[in-house]
Amino acid sequence: MTQALDFAEEVKTLEAVLRQLPEQQWQRPTQFKQWTPNDIVRHLHFWNEAADWSVHAPQALQRRLADMRASAARGEGMRVLEGLQVTASGPALLALWSRFALDMAERWHALDASMRVDWAGPPMSVRSSITARQMETWAHGQALFDQCGQERAESERLRNIVVLGVNTFGWSHQVRGWQVPQHMPRIELTGPQGQSWSFGEPGDAGLIQGSATGFAQVVTQTRHLLDTDLRVEGEVAKRWMLNAQCFAGPPEQPPAPGLRCKSTHMA
């Protein structure tokens, strides 16, 4: 399953920038909801463990889901439970997260991509599960690249996140209680190496053009539409791009224009 190898490469890319963080920087809030690097990497490890348990330790997954429900019933934020169950921080957390994720990727590479597993939401295929892990790594990694003032070098594997964004056109409407438009807008994107990636058919639903990176940033809510190079035409296309959400959970609002950007310094 090639998506497992793509997940591993995403982990290695983020690991490289995290290794440059001074220890005190691990407690400095990022532009993503004021989460620190410790918060972000704990979150990634917490959910990587849960995804891996869905295949290799289903009872452990069910215990974690029960813990989540109990935590929510107490009115606690997700970071409280994640901090209790993943206690490492700084460089030790980095080592724990990267070692587990890369081992997971190697084991998942041999799985049947169509195998179904339980999850916090509806059951899904292991291909969808590992793609979601890559997407989460990429999306949360954006805040860390921003904090370090660095541009991420993108590759062909970005297409997995683009496809996830395209496939959640309906979900972006359903999660808000909106009727799903009959047709999806035409999408014409330029990949990281100049590839041409297109989806949908021309029609009344509109047109989205620009970089694959910009599209991925919008559907993962790491940038507002106006902070990307995307050109959007048509009401259906505009409504989607202003409210796109390729991840599960309750409806989330994208960041305000100008709120998230690459830092010009590290303190």
Image: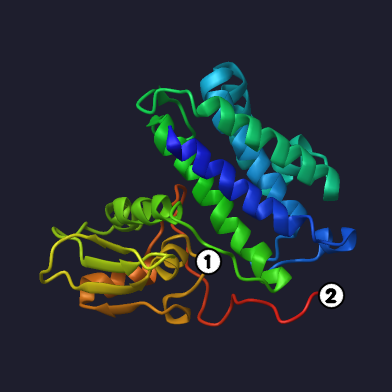
Quarter of the image where one finds residue 182: bottom left
Residue at the image position 76 percent from the left and 38 percent from the top? 96
**Residue on which disc 1 sits:** 222
Quadrant the N terminus occupies: top left
Residue 68, given in percent of the width and then of the height, sits at: 61, 36
> x, y (%) of residue 175?
36, 53
User: Residue furthest toward the left?
Assistant: 203
Amino acid on which the number 1 mark rests in the picture: Thr
Q: Which element carries disc 1, helix, strand or loop?
A: loop
Task: Return the x and y of residue 218 as percentages of the image width and height.
Answer: 43, 67
Q: Is residue 162 above or below residue 102?
A: below
Residue 31: tell me if it is visible: no
Q: Quadrant of residue 115?
A: top left
Alpha carbon of mark 2 to alpha carbon of mark 1: how far? Answer: 22 Å
Residue at image location 69% in from the left, 74% down from the top: 149
Q: Earlier in the sequence, mark 2 or mark 1?
A: 1
Q: Residue at x 72, y 36 (%)?
A: 99
The label shown at residue 267 is 2
**Residue 7 shows in this picture:** yes
Mark 2: amino acid: Ala
* 196 sits to left or right of 84: left
Secondary structure category for the residue under label 2:
loop
**Looking at the image, do the residues carrying marks 2 and 1 touch, with CB atoms under 8 Å apart?**
no
Q: Residues within 10 Å of mark 2 (few under 14, many from 20)?
A: few
Identify the residue shown where x is 73% and y is 52%: 39
- Give the left or right position of residue 25, taking residue 117 as reference: right
Q: Tag on residue 92?
A: none
